[in-house]
Amino acid sequence: MGAQRCVCLLLSGLLLVSCGGGNGDPAPAPDPQSRRTPVERLALKTFRSDCSDFLDYAADALTEQFLTPVYCATLVGAPCPVSAAEGPPPLAQPTPMPTPAATAAPGAPSFDGEGAGDPDRGSGTNTQEQGVDEADIVKSDAAGNLYILADNRLSIVDAYPPQDLADAAIATLDFAAIDDGAFYASELFLDDTADRAVVLGSSYRFDGVRSYGESLALIIDTADPQNPAVLERLGVDGFPLVARRIGERVHRVSRYDVMAPSWFYDDSELARLRDDYYDAQSRSDETAVARIRSEVRANVGNRVRAAGAETFLPRLHSGSGPGEVLACDAIAHPDVTTALGLMIVDSFDIDGSDGAASAVINNAFTVYASANNLYMVQSSWGWFFAPNQTEETAIYRLALPQNGAAAYEAIGKLDGSVNNSYQLSEFDGYLRVASTEFRFDEPSQRGVPYNHVTVLDAEAAGTMTKTGEIRDLAPGETIQGTRFIGPRGFVVTFEQVDPLFALDLSEPAAPRVADELKIPGFSSYLMPLGDDYLLTIGRDGTDEQLTGKVAVQLFDVADLSDIRQVAVLTPDSFDTSGSYSVAEYDPHAFTYFPDVADAPVPGTLSIPLQTYGERWEDSFNGFLVVRVDPATGTPLSELGRVDHSALVAAPSDCQPPPSDDGTPAPDGGSACEYWYGGQADPLRSVFLEDALGRTLYTISRAGVIASDAGQPSAVYASRVLP
């Protein structure tokens, strides 16, 4: 495409000011006197257009990296060539796949299909923030088509009405042809109003020494869902992390690690200087340490200037061109020296137009997006250069405009580390953050976790100042689940039992704990059901230990000062078996569908469920369907399960497991499914509703099953995926 791509790069990071552990020993544990980085040193500056100060910055970073023992343990003596600025090959079209044979479900309930043009209502991707779409492996459109990304294929299933699923058309794009098989698709966006899908993934190549990665987005025309076509490819050097869509604008976050040239690994003079440097450190000869460091810096600086800035910068690619290198005068950086790695935000419209990019340097692997801002979260423990840093987190706020690149606006800093995006939430101009800090009374002692909830001014320019804080929540325990909902927050910590903390955040200057409820086990994902209830999933437990089973819980949180557990459901399984649901740690797999669109309860929950026992007969691969109705005597009740194992045919040469007495099974039969159950791994659920009823579609790697949502064992039809 011919759209101009506007690019800029923002370098930011935490303290990396000295090379630690000079004799190669592990870095010491942080101690109470460990360093803190002034937030002013993390503020960003812009490089000059002639790239001179960028090259100095790169030389400083490579010097620190070269003298850090963790890097010296790998690839010493191995040539590491500079990556060539080559463009991607011409765009290869995915290969159409033959439609598999249809399979009708026996005993399917009647469904006359009257008025079955399009469904009236359906479930969408479960997201953290309203108005911020998240890429996922399954999407559905208003016509009842399912877009399923599995095994590097996009299958578009004409799934509505459900009784026709067995004979439904399936259009499949096989992405094996992209980049000669190097591309792997991981997730997608769908905008059926714009008739576009965006498939996100990565392409890797290996030259015999190291890998080269490219984060790719394929723009797909879905105007005719049964004849999809790839229109464009948008690439950026690196590999994908997360993506968000706000309106028609897609924001893709990728990671790019600057590849050091071959001399970084195989130059004999530099290797000699490094050995001398470690020897001087072991002798505590500070004069020699400083002199050798200066020699290394001069040597590296000369080589960096000779190589030029383009050697160290990523390219953005549109189509099959060589790509555009980020310009130095579009790059900003902090005062502190950091490793050369970039978090790139590549933004474009759903049709691939109006491409733009910005980036932030290194190790901010946690990303959270509100409707207007993108936050990158970077822990001080993610760096090698200064082992005695205090455990702190820097949070970078980037504005997300309706067009153009994401723009850096401010930085905030707080104690502790943040593990996932659900530990952040923007509301009413404030950013709330839950973090865990490990403290060491003595350097040799094991750290004790302390948890904090910090409120930052999310509208401040330059520095997001702290307005309020709850400190030292549940000492000795770690955060397992967090959810912020408007002026309230809920935090789950765990050591042996599960304290659920209810937080009143209505006063940003004075956040407080409103109530605490201790129950066995813990919840890892929390979904609000309006203002009155909290629906969670996590691990079941006793007062002594976890049981190894899934637990679904419902809490009454209408009165924040008196929260109550309403019900807990532990799916029945054999006495010796455990159970697991991917929904415990992937909210996209947690699908709740209220009976009425504007009333959060009652409703129906569908989650993947896998059980594992001592015998193959004890195993289950499918979905658990739960009725949620607080007004009844059983607020949580199991409606049934949908088993996907039957969609997987056992191969003829399958060797079944022996029976309990050790004798071999007489034939393959269903026993073989135990070994091949991974092919039926449960993935996602989709609800579709029309005037005739509510249908549950459950999707696994093997296929799709359509069931009555109120009676999941009543299967309308099933279909095996290609």
Image: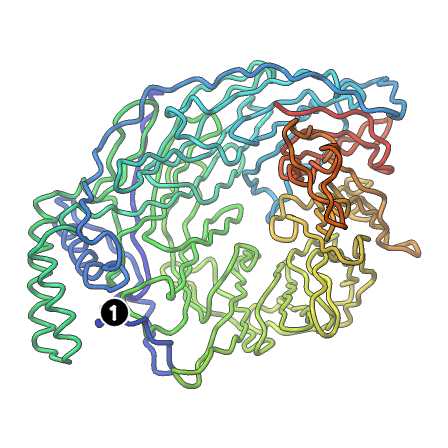
Asked if 543 appears above or below 166 in the picture, the reply is below
* Residue 683 shows up from this direction: no
Q: Which residue is mark 1?
A: 24
Most extreme residue toward the front is: 663
Identify the image quadrant of residue 276: bottom left
Q: Secondary structure at mark 1?
A: loop
Q: Nearer the viewer, residue 548 or 530?
A: 548
Q: Position of residue 245 (x, y in %)?
A: 52, 38
Q: Foreground residue, 632 or 155? A: 155
Residue 17 x %, y %: 24, 68
Task: Inspect this view and state whether residue 565 appears.
Answer: yes
Q: Seen in the image, is 251 located left or right of residue 629? A: left
Percent x, y for residue 40?
30, 67
- Image quadrant for the N terminus? top left
Relative to 1, 717 lies left or right: right
The vertical placement of 393 against 620, above or below, is below
- Name the amino acid, label 1: Gly
Residue positioned 49% across, 29% down in the render: 350
Residue 496 place in picture, x, y as percent: 66, 73
